[in-house]
Image (tube, grey):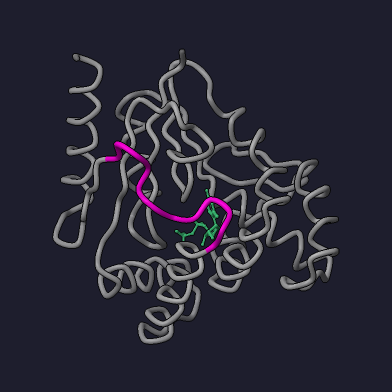
């Protein structure tokens, strides 16, 4: 069985950064499942589909199943176009969260995410990696941090990418996103059974990575 480390948690909790570094340290593959939802959001935006139009989203689910997505050279490609930075915009993140409530879309993206499980192993980050996509993951981590610290982290990330941002708007948006992700019926955001909870409010990235690696070492030695 190919090992999987599932890292789930709320928006801007640092999952992506921690998951990538853990993958690097172990020589594992990395799946940014949020990027797949963001690519679906970008596709729906470009197709002019409204996020609350369920029939339109049924066609998006069909479209999403066939999206030409490639993660290559540290870049994200959609039909040959490099969109890694475009999909980081808050508008796309918020739209991703809005469309992610539709079960048909989640179903369409399920097998695509599972296909990332390749030897020697996978670190996957998202909302439902440990609950739905890889329920048999050997290690499940729920990574979180206070809303205020997450808003600051997201602010820094957006400013570095050259996007305009305001801490107070980000704080409100992330609280809205938390509520929507946690309260939806399909694959709500919650710690998987048996998940180790890691609150990184007062931790550096290196400390968080070291903790996940220590948990993984414990699992593989027992
Ligand atoms: O970067 P951030 O944590 O804000 O978001 P993301 O991981 O890029 O995901 C964007 C949105 O996609 C989230 O707000 C979720 O609603 C949705 N998503 C999901 O439903 N399931 C996943 N496995 C990953 C993301």
Q: Nearer the viewer, residue 147 or 32?
A: 147
**Residue 55, x across and y down, in percent:** 85, 63
Seen in the picture, residue 67 relative to 214 is either above or below; the reply is: below
User: What residue range appears in magenta?
Assistant: 184-195
Residue at image position (76%, 48%) is: 64
| Image position of 89 (left or right of 158) | right
* Horizontal side of residue 48 vs 109, given as left or right: right
- 76 relative position to 176: left or right: right
Answer with left or right where residue 65 lies relative to residue 215.
right
Residue drawn at the location 73% of the way across and 50% of the way down:
104
**Does residue 209 belong to the magenta stretch?**
no
Q: Residue at x 60, y 36 (%)?
A: 113
The x, y position of residue 130, in whole percent, is 43, 38
Q: Tag count in the figure?
A: 0
Q: Nearer the viewer, residue 205 or 8?
A: 8
Q: Main secondary structure of the magenta part?
A: loop
Residue 208 % position (x, y): 21, 46
Question: In which image quadrant can residue 19 be found?
Answer: top left
- Residue at the location (38% across, 68% down)? 154
Q: Quadrant of the C terminus?
A: top left
The answer to if 194 sits in the magenta stretch is yes
| Residue 81 on image: x %, y % | 73, 50
């Amino acid at each position: 069985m190919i090992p999987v480390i599932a890292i789930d948690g709320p928006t801007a909790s640092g999952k992506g950064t921690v998951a990538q570094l853990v993958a690097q340290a172990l020589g594992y593959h990395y799946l940014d499942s949020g990027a797949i939802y963001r690519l679906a959001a970008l596709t729906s935006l470009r197709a002019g589909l409204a996020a609350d139009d369920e029939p339109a989203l049924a066609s998006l689910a069909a479209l999403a199943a066939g999206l030409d997505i490639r993660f290559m050279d540290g870049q994200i490609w959609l039909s040959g176009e490099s969109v890694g930075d475009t999909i980081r915009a808050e508008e796309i993140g918020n739209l991703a969260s809005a469309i992610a409530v539709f079960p048909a879309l989640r179903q369409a993206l399920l097998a695509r995410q599972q296909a990332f499980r390749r030897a020697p192993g996978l670190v996957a980050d998202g909302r439902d990696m440990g609950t739905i996509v890889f329920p048999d993951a050997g290690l499940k981590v729920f990574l979180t941090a206070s809303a205020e610290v997450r808003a600051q982290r997201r602010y820094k990330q957006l400013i570095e990418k050259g996007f305009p941002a305001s801490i107070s708007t980000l704080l409100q948006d992330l609280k809205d996103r938390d509520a929507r992700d946690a309260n939806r019926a399909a694959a709500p955001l919650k710690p998987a059974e048996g998940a180790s909870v890691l609150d990184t409010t007062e931790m550096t990235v290196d400390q968080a990575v070291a903790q996940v690696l220590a948990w993984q070492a414990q699992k593989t030695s027992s």
